[in-house]
Image (cartoon, rainbow, N blue to C red):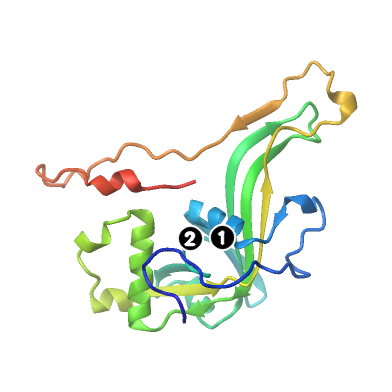
Amino acid sequence: MENHTLAGPVDPSPGDFSPTARTRLRRLSERGHYDRKTVYEILDAGLVCHVGYVIDGQPYVTATAYWRIGGRIYWHGSAASKMLRHLKGGVPVCFTVSLLDGLVLARSGFHSSINYRAVMALGRAQLVADRDEKLAALTAFSERLTPGRWPELKPPSEQELKATTVISLELEEVAAKVRTGPPKDDEEDLSLPVWAGVVPVATVLGQPEADPLLAPDIPAPAYLQDISIG
């Protein structure tokens, strides 16, 4: 698998995504985006995805943490996970990420909405089987959450690596959908005596809370200030 270095989420893939019959937006098509810049910015702003798949005819959707390295996305979990045991067989998946940016309050219920950024990717899940690639992927995940933390952590043991399954999905059939801006009321409703506008929504990181068992002489590391989300 190409491009699993830890130099950052750089993608050598040329060009943008081509909309397909499954990813092209037909209603409100102006909200559709297929350029890598938009897709990657949304993916890099989030931490939690939802992965859809089918086992024995039953659809499932599982929420899990994810990260991006170049033109691939990754997620991981226990080797005993029912989802991961199924996905490592290379089954089709629907991967989605949604970020809520605001409540859009229109003068009518019909036109009330939300501002959001979302990505959907379709493809086949792939097991990351190579030990070095798996370790590189897990390192990248740690660095995505807390840049600079991995070097000071206790390295994973061989048993811990064996107990962890890492799945990847190449970004090929992808679409982003974005809504921004104020309400879009009908012109005849603009004079109604109803407040209209947007209530912004943001994910805010709180102050770090030390483990009660932490030695008192260990200060909060500087990299805690570099965590970003949203």
Residue beneath the point at 51% across and 72% down: 12
The reply to whether callout 2 and callout 1 are in contact (CB within 8 Å) is yes
- Crowding at dot 2, Cα within 10 Å, few <14 / some 14-19 / many 20+, comes out as few
Residue beneath the point at 39% across and 58% down: 144
Task: Tell me which amino acid carries mark 2.
Answer: Thr
The residue beneath circle 1 is 50
Does dot 2 land on a helix, a strand or a loop?
A: strand
Q: Give the answer, above or below, for where 32 lies relative to 21.
A: above
Q: Quadrant of residue 142?
A: bottom left
Would residue 188 be found to the left or right of residue 30 on screen? right
The residue beneath circle 2 is 64
- Tell me residue 114's x, y (percent): 67, 39
Does dot 1 land on a helix, a strand or a loop?
A: strand
- Tell me residue 139's x, y (percent): 33, 67
- Crowding at dot 1, Cα within 10 Å, few <14 / some 14-19 / many 20+, comes out as some
Task: Tell me which amino acid carries mark 1.
Answer: His
Residue beneath the point at 43% across and 68% down: 76
Would residue 203 be found to the left or right of residue 29 on screen? left
| The residue positioned farthest toward the left in the image shown | 217
Q: Quadrant of residue 225?
A: top left
